[in-house]
Amino acid sequence: MKMVMKFGGAAVKDAAGISQVVKIVKESTGKGHQIIVVISALGGVTDRLVELMKNITASKKSTIDASIEALAAIHIAAIKSIDDQVISQQVTRTVRSLLDDLKNVVMGISHVGELTPRSRDLLLSFGERLSTPILAAALEAEGIHAKALTGGEAGILTDDNFGSAEPLMNVTSMQVRQNLDPLMKDGIIPVVSGFIAATQTGVMTTLGRGGSDYSAAIIGLALKVDELWFWKEVRGIMTADPSLYPESRLIKKIAFDEAIEIAHFGARVIHPRALEVGLDSDLIYQIKDVWEPEKEGTHIIRFVDENDDNKGVVRAISVIDRVHLINISGARLVGTPRVAGRVLEMLADQDIDVLMISQSSSEANMSIAVPEADADDAMNVLELSLLGSKLVREITGEGGFCIVATVGRGMRGTPGVAANVFKSMADNKINIRTIAQGSSELNISFIVSRKDMKAAVEALHKDFKLDSMDA
Ligand code: ASP
Ligand code: MG
């Protein structure tokens, strides 16, 4: 089989993680599989780079040297997984030289005193640029021929929307094939940095936080691989968050569109953009636990057979915790279609995620759910621009909520699902504040108080018989 294997930062955070990845790749090639590896930064490294960036601009320059030293320590420790002295010394030099480059970039930004989106991407690229040669060297040391490539070197070309660049799929597909096929023909495993790519003129871009799943999907699509395996530190997608409901089950098989709904909610097992790539393809994804490689994880496929033993109206219960509810009211909302649009636009301009929106049919009321962390900013921007305009009478905010969602393809066109959801809540005396259903009918979401969060998940899990799904 030709396959992309993507290893996330949580899986590769230290020497033990790197050794485990090498073991997995070695076993797979031993079975005759053709592998392309995509790797993200070592665990926590991108967060450290973000922190470093904040310190440069906050002129806490004294912390910069210490931060870079800490990054050096993490990567040098990861190199300890490599026994071969020559290879280990070689990659240590590569890492040191990249860290020097990083320091120069940091100094440059610090002198200019301004952080542009372009320099931000350049700075963030170092996480993956450091991890990739280490993994390639670790494979070489085990006698597996490997070559480290940045996303751009592999052929992923994007627009220049720094921070969340979009791949130019046609040219990317062509370039990826041109760059990777010859390597594979020579028996060399490409080890590609996830998350980072390049514009057509070679400027470094990033695909957005968590974007190395996306890189893996782009490469998998370009090379028309048989399967993409996403190695995580969990076995797969669960019917509910185990920390909320310990009886939750592993979902063995799920369709891309269902998985997208789950991924947009709390449980970020896999990046939604990676799933979108699969949506119109015949690709097969699998999520697997890097520490239990022999176990089956979650298969994500285009279409789940309705006769499958895993069918069922509701496939999973998802939760977004810590939600703030903003109510906008005022008679002038009626017949003023621009208000809803303006509200969403203003929040988007502030980088505030609107988690849910609902409007009563009288249109005199509109509720918007935003993350609690953004509540103050959201209230400020809305009050400033809307109250003055006399379009609305009142804006109120209330915290302490969560969004609960039931997700499943089977809900589409099945009457009575919503009624059952609400009956389940009523039976447990859980008050629902706001309801929304996407037009895809794959998802019914509603807002309840955080204190009811666990009870709501448990009730739905039981009432929709997810407990008895075979694991
Ligand atoms: N290293 C990047 C991040 O932490 C990309 C990724 O991990 O997928 O956001
Ligand atoms: Mg990461």
Image (tube, rainbow, N blue to C red):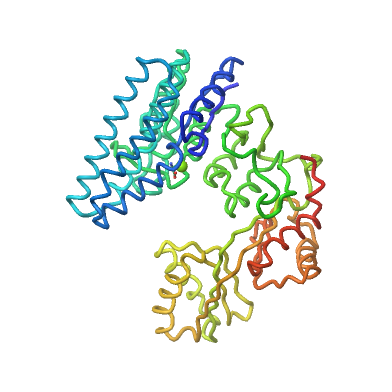
- The percent position of residue 47, horizontal first and vertical second, equals 41, 47
Residue reaching furthest to the left:
111
Query: Which quarter of the frame holds ligand 1?
Result: top left
- The percent position of residue 465, horizontal first and vertical second, equals 81, 52
Whether residue 152 sits left or right of residue 305 in the image: it is left
- Which is more toward the observer, 339 or 245? 245
Whether residue 42 sits left or right of residue 425 in the image: it is left
- The percent position of residue 282, horizontal first and vertical second, equals 62, 34
- Which is more toward the observer, 52 or 205? 52
- The percent position of residue 243, horizontal first and vertical second, equals 65, 52
458 relative to 190, above or below: below
460 relative to 327, above or below: above
208 relative to 357, above or below: above
Whether residue 340 sits left or right of residue 431 in the image: it is left
- Which is more toward the observer, 139 or 420? 139
Q: Quadrant of residue 133?
A: top left
